[in-house]
Amino acid sequence: MPFAPVTLAPSPLLGRPGAVAGDGVDATVAAHYGDPLREQRLLIEGLAAVDLSNRDVLTITGPDRLTWLHSMTTQHLTGLAPWTSRESLVLSPKGHIEHDLHLVDDGERVWITLEPGTGVALAEWLDRMRFMLRVEVDLVTASYAVLGEPVGREFAPGDPVGVAAWRDPWPDLVGDTTAYGPAEHPAAGRAWRELIVPRAELEKAVEDRALAGMWAAEALRVADWRPRVGYETDHRTIPHEVDWLRTAVHLHKGCYRGQETIARVHNLGRPPRRLVFLHLDGSGHTLPERGTQLTLDGRAIGHLTSVARHYEDGPIALAMIKRNTPEDAELRAGDISAAQSTIVTP
């Protein structure tokens, strides 16, 4: 069945004092509420929530829902206990990342949150893959919204706000998997979850809470080396390049689309590119744009994927570069120097 695209109105939370709308896929939610650096500190202290109501929301019902998703995506999902969060990827036949599924099963349905604007494509693909299985796919973005909050626990039935929540496992190793980066991860102990609430109750859900905008949330994501579909990924990104096996890929499960690439690169080769964290020279007043070309000795070796201003570290970024770029090389983003920290070891 065709799924109608959902055109979301600007979030009612843009009516909060000081709110400034974002841009691109985040245009319907707030970039900040007047003080993005203070908003980062509020998130670090667990005192604020982030309006993620631009994210798409899907539900999948039916007794075959978990075994069906298990068979098509990268994570082990059979036997998943109710209210247990998982992250799973949908790959192309050649192993390139297409969708990042933030999913939790409530015992009757699977709730999935997705990057803004990607829900229709995923819902239509899933619907085509139902065959004779007992599953139903619904795109419910128009009825449900998402709030990000610095909470490190799973949702429990009876929680006063919301219908479900996805707890982010990053950067833990989930299941039979591996890491492509250093053993000591800067995001260790990270507390983050996405709370799903009826869209009509979005304002009520945060009436007594401080709000932080997307600039604050993105700065902390970049500092935690957390990849985002459409930012750290393009049409040829494989999970190894962004260290995404650690939370989203089970290495010894049944066949799924793209599995051959996962196994071949893991067992026999190295990813052709690697994600890096960058400290940018902050002596200027402007940040380079996402997508800015990175060079080494005048030669193009990659591009910036996310750029932010951190409340402690100043200008920071994530970037995708060629695997064989020396780890100690100082790169340039236009006229701005950039010092690397290794995320994916070459």
Image (cartoon, rainbow, N blue to C red):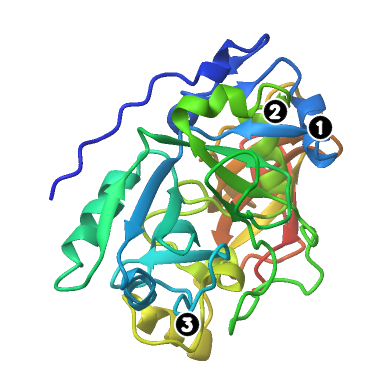
Return the mark for residue 156. none
Residue 273 seen from this side: no
Q: Residue pushed farthest front?
A: 158
Could you give the CA–CA distance between mark 3 and mark 1, rounded to whole angstroms? Answer: 40 Å
Residue 141 seen from this side: yes
Q: Quadrant of residue 184?
A: bottom right
Say which amino acid is labelled 2: Ala
Left or right of 309: which side holds 75?
left
Say which amino acid is labelled 3: Val
Could you give the CA–CA distance between mark 2 and mark 3, rounded to whole angstroms? Answer: 39 Å
Instruction: Give the crowd class for mark 3: few <14, some 14-19, many >=20 residues within 10 Å.
Output: some
Work out whether mark 2 precedes mark 1 in sequence or the reverse, and give the earlier one: 1
Q: Quadrant of residue 188?
A: bottom right
Return the mark for residue 212. 2
Across and down, in percent, residue 31 comes to 60, 24
Total number of numbered discs in the rendering: 3
Say which amino acid is labelled 1: Leu
Report the residue at 20% width, 67% height from top.
129
C-beta proximity under 8 Å, tags 2 and 1: yes
Return the mark for residue 42. 1
